[in-house]
Image (spheres, helix red, strand yellow):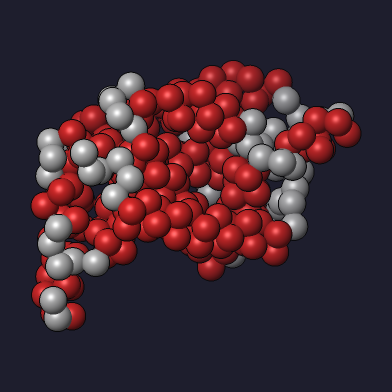
Amino acid sequence: MNGRAQLIALKAILWKEILRFSRIWVQTILPPMITTALYFVIFGRLIGSQISDVSGFHYMDYIVPGLILMAVITNSYGNVVASFYSAKFQHNIEEMLVSPLPNYLIMIGFIGGGLARGIAVGAAVTVVALFFTSIPLHNLWVAGSVLLLTSILFSLGGLINAIFANSFDDITVIPTFVLTPLTYLGGVFYTVAMLSPFWQSISLANPILYMVNAFRFGLLGVSDVNLVTAYLAMIGFNIGLFWYALYLLNRGYGVRT
């Protein structure tokens, strides 16, 4: 399979993934916008008005980066895990795997769909946030690169979850019992300085904390963690999960009966 044919096949997978979530935008893009608006009303105005400034910012302004990234994380993950497992369930994935298209390009197609949905939802949530507060941009490169690395990372996580899943129930276990707790405890609504030393050390073991704070630095210019450490963690996780997912596909794990 020559390079041109591979590119056409990759574009077809990517376009299919984008159409998949954009056609049902009422179910994929609108709910995060409504949820974010509720977060701003409840946490930003009602509770936030009773909280003093955090790291020199009003509480509502402080939680904006975390809310945007939280929406990106959940939607990047959810898009890939649902799409890939549906392809397994309907036995469409076998047709891709027996084709001359390399497995890494199949992965890139699904990951690209998760990335596209993550960015689309992130942009939509940002628009909602602008109705409640202004959003400064301290460093465009940092904000953009963290957004991309985080979306790719959780798209890979969704792909691995789908590979191991044997039922539709299996694709909800990780988001419910792992992803959601880590996200809420990842510094979205608070700064680590508010915690006792013991809980600070516990929080620093949460990888999402580094992503949220790196993105917060890109927008607000403040962070609880070292930026270099955050980038090393994100890049390391991306490389590790990519090769692990590729290894699973090459072995045919979860897709061969």
**In this rendering, would 209 be left or right of 165?**
right
Q: Residue reaching furthest right?
A: 197
Answer whether residue 227 is visible to the viewer in this image: no
Q: Position of residue 37 (x, y in %)?
A: 43, 28
**Visible in this render: residue 153?**
yes
* Percent position of residue 93, x then y: 17, 47
On the image, which quarter does residue 208 sit in? top right
Q: Which of 27 and 248 lies nearest the eye of the viewer? A: 248
At 33% from the left and 21% from the top, the residue drawn is: 169
Determine whether, in the image, residue 126 is placed left or right of residue 101.
Answer: right
Q: Say which quadrant the C terminus sits in.
A: top left
> Compared with residue 149, is residue 126 higher up or lower down, i.e. above or below?
above
Where residue 95 appears, as percent x and y from the top left, is 11, 52
Which residue is painted at 43% across and 25% down in the image? 173
**Residue at 76% of width from left, 34% of height from top?**
202
In-image side of 106 versus 183 (left or right): left
Against 187, residue 100 (above or below) is below
Q: The N terminus appears in which quarter of the rendering? A: bottom left
Q: Nearer the viewer, residue 241 or 220?
A: 241
Residue at image coords 45%, 60%? 243
Examine the rendered structure and indicate whether residue 91 appears above or below residue 196. Answer: below
How many labels, in total?
0
Give the x, y percent position of residue 114. Answer: 32, 49
User: From what the image shows, is residue 112 above or below residue 28?
Assistant: below
